[in-house]
Image (tube, helix red, strand yellow):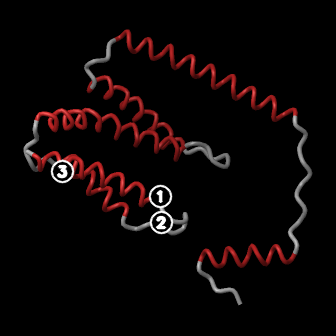
Amino acid sequence: MIEGSVQIWLGFFLILVGTFWGRMGPAFQRNRYYLPILIFGFLCLVIERYDLDEQGLLLKDAIDNFFPWFLSGFIGYYLVLIGAPTYWKIRYPQLILGWIIIFISFYLYVKYNNHISVTDVFISFSSIIGILLSITFFVFLVRFVENRIPPEDPAPELTDSEKEFVRNTISKNIGVDVE
């Protein structure tokens, strides 16, 4: 019985370690072992190898109810972020598919959580409307304040020594010898 609980907690721990290792180091050289550790931790949570006690069964049940909607929501949000306009380029297939998957994750959330009622949904929507109004007001306020501030003059061109310093720093970071 204790082995099942150890397996679940090991899975949580490995997922945390994999996530932290994936964020360690400079952006151009991340730790390469984070993905196998992350996958192994996920497999420890999903694959039942040992019998669980009552508390372990409750935790396993909560995990089983959590993963379907969370995973679909994560994939949907990832696709929406990929499809979002960056540098004035919108990727419509990823954007549309991402929003469809997000709505599917909302459906899965309601399906896997039996404690949600229609009243809870209406209360949540009223809260969301209040949050959206607050964010909209904040955005307009920031835009108003930023438009009242006069633009600054462009920065002067870099001197030769500054250009050399930037060139050396970038060359050192990408691993190119400067001669």
Which residue is drawn at the image coordinates 14% and 35% (left, top)?
57
Left or right side of 97 for 91: right
| Residue farthest along the bottom direction in this orientation | 179
Amino acid type of the residue tagged 2 in the rendering = Arg
Q: Where in the figure is residue 3, as x and y percent of width and height?
A: 12, 50
From the image, tell me which residue sits under label 1: 23
From the image, tell me which residue sits under label 3: 7
Left or right side of 168 for 135: left
The answer for how far apart the CA atoms under marks 2 and 3 are is 27 Å
**The quarter of the displayed image where residue 119 is located:** top left
In this view of the protein, which residue sits in the foreground, 82 or 42? 42
Left or right side of 135 for 101: left
SS at circle 1: helix
Dots 1, 3 in contact, CB < 8 A: no
Which residue is drawn at the image coordinates 51% and 17% (left, top)?
127
Amino acid type of the residue tagged 3 in the rendering = Gln
In this view of the protein, which residue sits in the foreground, 179 or 78? 179
From the image, tell me which residue sits under label 2: 30
Left or right side of 159 for 177: left
Dots 1, 2 in contact, CB < 8 A: yes
